[in-house]
Image (cartoon, rainbow, N blue to C red):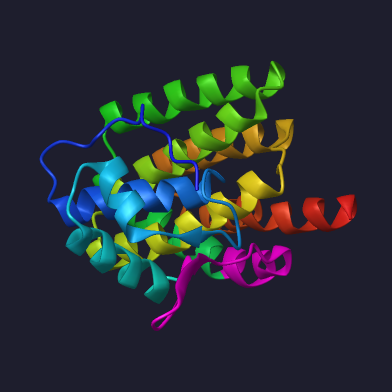
């Protein structure tokens, strides 16, 4: 089981949090492949922690659907099910739309400036065909809105859904298009105008269109 040794180790986190975040990231980006058997001793050595936080992290990752633990036998990374996109994106789209509506009350010039700067980087990534960077920047854009909504319950649910979506997008090489750039601009402008009625449909479409584009490629 090859595990990188040059990863960055988060600071100001417990051993359990550090282990969970890094193992989840390895599963998302394919460092730990679907179906791969995990060895808690090897993971603990690579992460520089004891086996206890690794085991606790694997238990949490099982609850979230990233690994499957077979008692007394093995722990395996779950498979990537392409069709799960149809189940993941609709609830995420609704929650993202709600976040945008809530964020309007907390919107400041600084937040608007950050969103516009992120969309500029997003535009450059798409037009240079750096689609992997575009996916990460797109997530950054939406995270600013989720943070501005200032609702911890929505934040936690989205974080869980977003991790699965990130894994699906990575393994299926999802390509975001120019239309996403325009939708981001519309989202920013509608938030500035306080136009909830028009904002929610645009935000939902920004997420749900991915399902249509993905199905068109099959």
Q: Is residue 36 above or below residue 121?
A: below
Relative image position of residue 76 (x, y in whole percent): 51, 67
Relative image position of residue 212 (x, y in whole percent): 79, 57
> Residue placed at 27% from the left, 51% from the top?
44
Q: 64 left or right of 92?
A: left
Q: In this view, does 69 lie above or below 147?
A: below
Relative image position of residue 126 (x, y in whole percent): 67, 24
Give the mark count.
Answer: 0
Which of the pair 200/115 is nearer the observer?
115
Magenta stretch encompasses residue 177: no
Magenta stretch encompasses residue 73: yes
Which of the pair 55/137 is nearer the observer?
55
The reply to whether residue 103 is in sight is: no
The reply to whether residue 133 is in sight is: yes
Q: In this view, does 73 lie above or below 179?
A: below
Q: Give the range drawn in magenta.
A: 65-90
């Amino acid at each position: 089981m090859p595990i990188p040794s040059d990863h960055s180790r988060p600071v100001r986190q417990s051993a359990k949090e550090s282990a969970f975040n890094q193992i989840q990231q390895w599963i998302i980006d394919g460092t730990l492949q679907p179906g791969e058997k995990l060895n808690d001793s090897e993971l603990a050595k690579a992460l520089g922690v004891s086996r206890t936080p690794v085991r606790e992290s694997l238990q949490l990752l099982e609850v979230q659907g990233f690994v499957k633990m077979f008692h007394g036998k093995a722990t395996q990374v779950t498979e990537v099910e392409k069709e799960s996109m149809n189940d993941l994106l609709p609830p995420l789209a609704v929650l993202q739309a709600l976040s945008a509506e809530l964020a309007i009350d907390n919107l400041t010039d600084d937040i608007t400036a950050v969103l516009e700067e992120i969309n500029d980087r997003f535009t450059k990534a798409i037009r240079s065909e750096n689609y992997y960077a575009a996916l990460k920047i797109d997530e950054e854009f939406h995270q600013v809105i989720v943070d501005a909504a200032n609702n911890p319950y929505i934040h936690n649910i989205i974080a869980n859904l977003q991790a699965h979506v990130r894994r699906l997008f990575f393994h299926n090489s999802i390509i975001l298009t120019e239309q996403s750039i325009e939708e981001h601009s519309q989202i920013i402008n509608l938030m500035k105008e306080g136009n909830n009625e028009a904002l929610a449909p645009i935000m939902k479409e920004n997420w749900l269109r991915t399902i249509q584009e993905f199905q068109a490629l099959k």
